[in-house]
Image (spheres, helix red, strand yellow):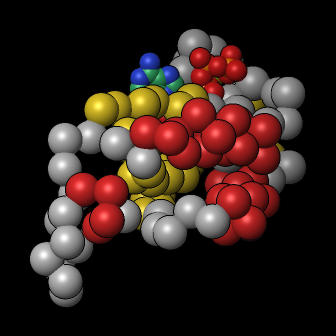
Amino acid sequence: MKFITAIIKPFKFTDVKQALSDLGVSGLTVTEVSGYGRQKGQTEVYRGAEYVSSMLPKLKLEIAVSDAFADKVIEIVSASAHTDEIGDGKIFVFDLADVLRVRTGEQGDLAL
Ligand SMILES: Nc1ncnc2c1ncn2[C@@H]1O[C@H](COP(=O)(O)OP(=O)(O)OP(=O)(O)O)[C@@H](O)[C@H]1O
Ligand SMILES: [Mg+2]
């Protein structure tokens, strides 16, 4: 299994969520975060306003998926979060050792 963490522009969330839902992803966690990338100190446009701050608001998505599904999910997140402007975000991929579904006690792929 893989654990996919994606940092995206907040206004792209609806598109990304819809794309993941269409793909059949069974769960998703989202957190408001702030961060910076390579252009720290330079301006980036967010909701029509130019931010000069080096810390910009982003959303962090966390998605646990089976190995067979991981590449497709990464591709879909990347495509649906893409604007071709700086600050589009990053996707980090981790190996996921295990998952436990609390209600049923299922583990691994069955718990996703
Ligand atoms: N190396 C990193 N480690 C952790 N988080 C990062 C890293 N790079 C970017 N991020 C996170 O992703 C967000 C968006 O990064 P961003 O898309 O600006 O990356 P970039 O490398 O500057 O690419 P671009 O040139 O397209 O802007 C940052 O605000 C930060 O939250
Ligand atoms: Mg950047």
Q: Residue at x 85, y 36 (%)?
A: 83
Q: Hey, which quadrant is residue 93 in on the image? A: top left
- Residue 25 percent location from the top left of the image: 56, 62
Q: Nearer the viewer, residue 18 or 32?
A: 18
The residue under the point 47% across, 64% down is: 28
List x then y, in percent, for residue 20: 66, 59
Q: Position of residue 22 (x, y in %)?
A: 74, 66
Q: Could you tell me which residue is drawn at 42 percent across and 48 percent down?
A: 66
Please state if 36 lies on the left or on the right of 104 as rendered: right
Q: Quadrant of ligand 1?
A: top right
Rendered position, 107 above or below 55: below
* Vertical position of residue 104 compared to residue 50: above or below: below
Image height of 111 relative to 35, above or below: below
Residue 105: where, in percent of width, then height? 13, 77
Asked whether, in this view, residue 14 is left or right of residue 27, the answer is right
Name the foreground residue: 43 vs 60. 60
Picture quadrant of residue 112: bottom left
Left or right: residue 71 versus residue 26 is right
Q: Is residue 55 among the parts visible in the rendering? A: no
Q: In front: 91, or 34?
A: 91
Give the residue displayed 19% in from the left and 41% down from the top.
Answer: 97
Residue 32 visible, this orientation: yes
Query: Total marks drawn?
Result: 0
